[in-house]
Every structure is written in C-alpha cells, then in structure tokens.
Image (cartoon, grey):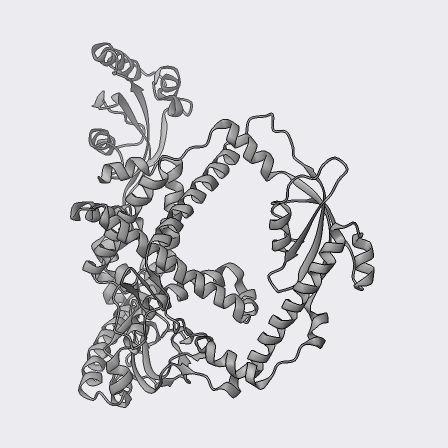
C-alpha cells in the first residue's frame, strides 16, 4: 500500500492532495495530547465531537500563519471582528471536512500498517541529522509538538489514511487539450462595464430601532454575545540560557577541558591527488593492459598531467591534468583511498589500482599533515561549551526540584519559584486564545483548562514548551463562559439592526431604480439623481481587485450582450450596499499557441481542486453536522 502511495505521490493530482493535506495539517495542528475541557464542542460530525481545545489549537496555528503572512498589518486586520469571525468559521469548516474524510476512510476500510508509519517517520527530514534518522531529534521534535510517540504515530497514520482517500478521489482526474485552451481563454477574458454604487448610509435617517426590537434581537441571538471563558494565571518560567552560574568558568577549567578534548581539535591529514582513469566496463583485459602501458610511460619519465589529459577516461579531471583536489579519509572508494594515503612523498605515484570504476594510477601532488588546533583558537568555543553544560546541569537540577515542590505544595508557586530562582509572573483575565507566550502553546493551554487547575486551583506539572525551557502554572481566577448583559451589547445591537433595516430599505428602493434602469433610464441620469458617480472598467479581469468582489463575480456570470446591446444587473454587495451594473461588451482572446507547462499545471490543479471540494461538500450534505448555538468564544 505504501508503494502505491509513493507511486501516486509523483503525479500532478498528488501535488493537489499534498496541498490539501498540508493545509489540514497546518489548521488542525500537530498536538494530540488533549486535556479535558469544561466547554461544549464547536461542532459534531455524525456523533463525533470536535472539541474547543482542538479548535483553539487549530485557530492559533491559523492565526500564526496569518501573522507571518501579513506581518505588522495583521494587528489592523485582526481588529475587525467580522474578519476574525470568518477566520474562526473557516477553521471550524475545515475541521469538519477533515473529520468527514476520516470517517469515510474508515468506512472504506483504508488502512496504513505500523511498518508503513514507521517507514514514513524514518524518512521525514524533520527527524534526520546529516541525512540519517536520529531518534533523539525525533523525540525532541514531537515533544515540542505536544506529542507522545504513540499519539504521533496515530496522528501520522490518520494523515496517511486520509491521503489514500484523496488519492482515490482526485488521482484519476485529467483535462483535455481543448479544455485547457478554452479555460485559458476564459481566464484571460475581459469585460467592459459601467456601474453605480448606492450606499445604505442614505437610508439610515429613515430608520429607528426600539428597545423592544433590541431586546428581541438579544434574546434570539444570545450566542453572538457570549463572553469567552477566561482565566488569570500565575506561572514561573525557566530557561537554561537565562540561568546565572554561581561559580563562573575559569581559565584553568577551560585549559583542562582542552587537554581532555584534544582529539576533537585535530585537523585530519589532507592529500591532494591526481589520477589517470582507464574505463574497464567494455573490455577489462584491454583496459588493464592500457593502464600498465601508461604506468610504464610514467616510470620512464613521461609527464603525468600530459598523459592524464591525453589518455584518462575521467573527462572532467583530465582537463585539469587529472587533478581531484584535496581529499580526506572516508571520502573515496577504499581501494583508491588506501593507495593514495600510502604514498609517502609529493610527486610519488601508485601502481595500477583497481576499483569498481576501472583502473587508476594515482599521484600525490600536495600534502597537508595532521594539525592540532592551538588552545587560543578554540578557547572561546570551549568556554561557551563548558558554560552551557554547567547551565544545563543546573537547569535539570532545578527542574527536578521545582517539579517536586510544585506537587508537594500544590496551592502556591512561591516555594517553587524560590528554588528556580525566578520571579512569578501573572496575567490578567484572558481567554484561551489570548494567552501570552509561553502560555500559548497547545500543551500549556490544555493543562490550564483541565478541571483540576480550573476548579481546584492546584499547580500544574512541569510543562516543556521548548528544549531546556519549561513553565509551571496555576489558575488564580476562572470566569466561565457566559452571555454578556444586554447593556454591554446594546450599542452593537442597535448598529446591527440599523444596518439591516437600512439595507432592506435600500434593497426595495434599488429594485424600483433597477426597473427604470432596464426600461432605458441611463446610468448617468440615475447617478446624478442619487448624487453619486458612474464608475467604469474598460477591461475588467476575473482577478481584479479594484472592483468589489460581488460585482466581479456577478459580471462574469452575465450572458454576453448582443451586438450593440447591453446587459443590466442589480448586485447586492457584501456590506449591504447595492450596485446597478451595465455590461457593455465581452472580449475573449483566441488561444492558438500551446500553453506552457506552468499554465497547464495551474488549470489542471484548479480543476482537480474544484472536483475535490465538490466531493467534500457532497460528504457534508449527506452527514449529520451539528454546530451548537454556543460554539466559538469570541476574542476580547
């Protein structure tokens, strides 16, 4: 089965699949060690719950991705509650889709064996050092991702199983050459439009909102006004790098360490060699005879570089007189290396040496003897290493003592902080998605929101947030999720109802204008009467960002106007405004030349992705998906 996955992973469809899997990986996070939670799930898929903790981890990963993408501008974007609500809902949708895929894979009997999972882990570059799997690197990495080995294996098994499912769905998709050209032509199509935007602001003067309407809205939409569960946290944090040594490392310590570690500071012997290679792949006897003849010429005084350039089958080195540059031990083939390092003096050359590549004659052209690095050159490095080792020893000693005291005296962190030699830190009341670093890691969040810490106010265990970096936390105050009082949200409700009523009035008003527009009233006449302007786009493209997305989407769905005619449309924008749109003409290029590889790949990937999303939507339409009315807590 793994072989089939490997074979499938080379195709174009597999690249789409990989993108989907990576996206789900990024959104779902890679923490699988979940604590209990007092909150209800954000969604339920055929009876399987998606917890608040799982959502929080996925949301934090998505938030971090957006912060990295937008940089300093993300703070401005995140200040828009509607935008953040869209992000939260998008995360929930993707978690639901992922669970639907998991369930279908289980129904179809898709399986990934233990051996396949093990092989996948061994091949992951994240767990490799110098190209080889390193168990220490593996354990260190999964600990940082809040995994135990068994939970990581199960997570990976789930990912690989889901990949099999996506491969089966999308792996057979293809696009015909004619479809490629037609799609390319549609993508490059432009449309000439004029439009007038009517804003709802002019209708607000006609709107009034009563207290009764505010109260009714509040009662019917209390899920919108949930104050998130909040905690105030006290914690101690210790990093090995921040530890101050009681006794500094002395010059004598560094000198002694140098004497103990001299073997690490030897520069190995290097040799510069040249060779003449005779290929024996076609006729071994003839090759050996030719090599012996060249050796005889060398012994007779012939120039090595000239013979290499004339007769060596190693074309690259032949142009350099056979030069292979500097070599060290354990680099070349053993027979070649043994012969090269047996040469005593510069200028000496070997007899004929046989390797799997053919027959060689090797000449020593330069020699760099083994050299010991002087103490002064490595003293700073040694001092830093001694200090780091001393800090690590003290760090792990403190970690053990802190763990014991935090457990034995579970109702305070004072004693543990004295042992750690750090001051206690505190937070104000914050929700789980606003915890500061280093408390915002999945492992720490999961621990904070367990019943033991929330209800009993006891200390957590030592929680590793990075190598040689841990925290111990305790909850000092806990406020459960609750509906905000009406007075706190009244202004928000009035604004919402005002906008809704204004949009409704505008919709009715614009329908009458649209009737007049279709009857022949000109856009300029309408714009003048409405104290606004006509906007024009001579060559509107599908990817245009200068026009409202709703207008672009509507315009490219309109039929082509007849010769000399026009097509009218009434478009409701995302913010509740409306636009009267006039499509004047459509320009579709004729694609005659073959598309380049990048264009073909983009169109094919788009088609495959569209089909895959349709498949996931079909799964959801047949499933029982419940999103509780009280679901995702909003940010402060």
- Quarter of the image with the N terminus in it: top left
Relative to 541, is 333 above or below?
Answer: above
148 displayed left or right of 504 = left
Q: In the rendered image of this protein, does residue 329 appear above or below residue 634?
A: above
**Residue 34 image-quadrant placement:** bottom left
Seen from the viewer's position, the closer of residues 501 and 80 is 501
Q: Position of residue 278 (x, y in %)?
A: 29, 17
> Is 516 positioned to the left or the right of 458 in the image?
right
Q: Is residue 114 left or right of residue 158?
A: left
Report x, y in % for residue 163.
30, 46
Q: Quadrant of residue 30?
A: bottom left
Judging depth in this view, the residue of 324 and 195 nearest the camera is 195
311 up-or-down from 369: above or below: above
Q: Can you see residue 127?
A: no
Measuring 41% from the left and 84% from the top, which residue is drawn there? Answer: 429
The part of the image, by quadrant, that contains residue 419 is bottom left
Q: Nearer the viewer, residue 478 or 138?
A: 478
Residue that appears at 19% across and 83% down: 407
User: Residue at image x 29%, y 66%?
Assistant: 467
């Amino acid at each position: 089965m793994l072989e089939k996955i490997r074979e499938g992973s080379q195709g174009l469809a597999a690249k789409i699949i990989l993108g989907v899997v990576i996206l789900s990986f990024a959104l779902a996070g890679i923490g699988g060690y979940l604590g209990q939670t007092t909150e209800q799930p954000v969604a339920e898929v055929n009876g399987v719950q998606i917890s608040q903790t799982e959502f929080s981890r996925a949301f934090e990963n998505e938030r971090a991705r957006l912060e990295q993408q937008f940089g300093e501008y993300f703070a401005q974007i995140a200040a828009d509650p509607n935008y953040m609500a869209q992000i939260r809902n998008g995360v929930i949708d993707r978690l639901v889709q992922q669970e639907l895929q998991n369930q279908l894979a289980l129904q179809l009997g898709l399986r990934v064996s233990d051996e396949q999972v093990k092989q996948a882990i061994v091949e992951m570059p994240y767990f490799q050092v110098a190209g080889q799997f390193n168990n220490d690197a593996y354990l260190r990495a999964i600990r940082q991702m809040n995994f135990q080995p068994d939970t990581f294996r199960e997570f990976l098994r789930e990912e690989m199983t889901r990949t099999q499912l996506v491969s089966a769905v999308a792996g057979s998709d293809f696009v015909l050459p004619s479809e490629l050209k037609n799609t390319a032509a549609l993508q490059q199509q432009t449309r000439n439009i004029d439009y007038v935007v009517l804003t709802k602001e002019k209708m607000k003067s006609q709107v009034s909102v009563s207290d009764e309407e505010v109260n009714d809205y509040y009662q019917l939409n209390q899920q919108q006004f949930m104050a998130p569960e909040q905690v105030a946290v006290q914690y101690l944090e210790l990093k090995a790098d921040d530890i101050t040594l009681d006794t500094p490392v002395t010059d004598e310590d560094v000198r002694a360490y140098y004497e103990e570690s001299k073997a690490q500071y030897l520069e190995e012997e290097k040799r510069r060699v040249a060779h003449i290679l005779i290929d024996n792949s076609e006729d071994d006897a003839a090759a050996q005879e030719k090599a012996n003849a060249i050796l005889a010429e060398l012994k007779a005084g012939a120039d090595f570089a000239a013979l290499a350039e004339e007769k060596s089958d190693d074309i690259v080195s032949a142009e350099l007189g056979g030069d292979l540059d500097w070599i060290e031990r354990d680099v070349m083939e053993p027979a070649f290396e043994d012969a090269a390092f047996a040469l005593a003096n510069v200028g000496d050359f070997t007899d004929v040496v046989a390797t799997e590549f053919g027959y060689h004659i090797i000449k020593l052209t330069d020699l760099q003897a083994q050299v010991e690095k002087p103490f002064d050159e490595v003293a700073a490095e040694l001092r830093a290493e001694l200090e780091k080792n001393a800090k690590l020893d003290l760090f792990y000693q403190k970690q053990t003592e802190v763990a014991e005291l935090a457990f034995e005296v579970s109702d305070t962190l004072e004693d543990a902080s004295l042992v750690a030699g750090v001051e206690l830190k505190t937070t104000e009341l914050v929700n789980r998605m606003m915890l500061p670093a280093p408390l915002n890691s999945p492992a720490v969040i999961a621990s904070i929101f367990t019943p033991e810490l929330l209800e009993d106010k006891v200390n957590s265990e030592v929680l590793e947030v990075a190598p040689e970096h841990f925290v111990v936390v305790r909850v000092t105050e806990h406020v459960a999720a609750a509906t905000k009082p009406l007075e706190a949200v009244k202004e928000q409700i009035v604004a919402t109802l005002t906008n809704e009523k204004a949009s409704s009035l505008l919709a009715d008003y614009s329908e009458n204008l649209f009737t007049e527009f279709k009857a022949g009233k000109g856009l300029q006449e309408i714009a003048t009467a409405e104290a606004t302007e006509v906007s024009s786009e001579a060559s509107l493209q599908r990817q245009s960002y200068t026009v409202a997305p709703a207008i672009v989407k509507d315009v490219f769905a309109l039929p082509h106007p007849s010769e000399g005619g026009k097509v009218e449309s009434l478009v409701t924008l995302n913010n509740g405004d409306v636009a009267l749109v006039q499509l004047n003409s459509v320009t579709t290029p004729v694609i005659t030349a073959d598309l380049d590889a990048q264009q073909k790949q983009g169109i094919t990937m788009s088609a495959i992705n569209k089909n895959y999303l349709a498949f996931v939507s079909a799964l959801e339409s047949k499933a029982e998906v419940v999103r509780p009315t009280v679901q995702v807590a909003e940010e402060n």
